[in-house]
């Protein structure tokens, strides 16, 4: 009996190898940055990985042939900086977390635009009413 590998195994092996190359220890604990005064700053990140793979064998008209295979895989990766590990030139070590607010400054600006537009309309609307009354 022949020990033949199923095609889905090749799809999964290729995808997993690519994920391993993208996400290594240097992704989570970054390369140290040394400041002129000797302080070393090391970035720390949170990494999230999702992976899916699947496939199916298709029968052919000629039943003596091996079935055809169709499959695929995909992955998604998120990398979020969460802190900096700071080692001073004196040897003191501290962790400086990055506060991640629920929304970025751009999100807050975009959310406030409708209210600002309404206020501008009210200001110009009142000016126009005051001029017409005089």
Image (spheres, grey):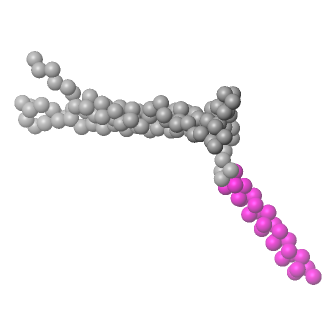
Image quadrant occupied by the C terminus: bottom right
Percent position of residue 114, x then y: 71, 59
- Front residue of 88/81: it is 88
- The quadrant in which residue 72 appears is top left
Q: Residue at x 21, y 27 (%)?
A: 6
- Front residue of 124/26: it is 26
**Number of numbered discs visible in the structure rendering:** 0
Give left or right: position of 87 versus 28. right
Q: Residue at x 65, y 36 (%)?
A: 39
- The quadrant in which residue 119 appears is bottom right
Q: Residue at x 27, y 36 (%)?
A: 71
- Front residue of 122/73: it is 73
Q: Residue at x 76, y 61 (%)?
A: 116
**Would residue 47 be visible to someone looking at this image?**
no
Return the residue found at the far top.
1
Return the residue found at the far right.
134
Question: Which SS type dominates the magenta stretch?
Answer: helix
Give left or right: position of 109 versus 20. right
Residue 123 against residue 73 in the figure, above or below: below
**Would residue 13 be visible to someone looking at this image?**
yes
Give the magenta range: 108-134
Image quadrant occupied by the N terminus: top left
Question: Is 112 included in the stretch rendered in magenta?
Answer: yes
Percent position of residue 81, x then y: 58, 38
- The quadrant in which residue 62 appears is top left
Percent position of residue 61, x then y: 10, 37
- Front residue of 46/107: it is 46
């Amino acid at each position: 009996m022949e020990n033949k590998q199923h095609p889905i195994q090749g799809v999964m092996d290729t995808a997993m190898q690519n994920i391993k190359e993208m996400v290594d220890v240097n992704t989570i604990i970054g390369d140290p940055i040394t400041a002129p005064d000797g302080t070393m700053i090391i970035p720390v990140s949170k990494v999230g990985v999702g992976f899916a793979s699947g496939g199916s064998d298709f029968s052919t008209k000629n039943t003596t042939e091996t079935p055809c295979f169709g499959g695929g895989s995909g992955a998604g990766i998120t990398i979020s900086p969460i802190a900096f590990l700071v080692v001073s030139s004196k040897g003191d070590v501290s962790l400086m977390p990055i506060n991640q607010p629920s929304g970025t400054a751009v999100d807050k600006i975009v959310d406030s635009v409708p209210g600002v537009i309404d206020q501008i309309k009210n200001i110009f609307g009142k000016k126009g009413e005051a001029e017409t009354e005089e």
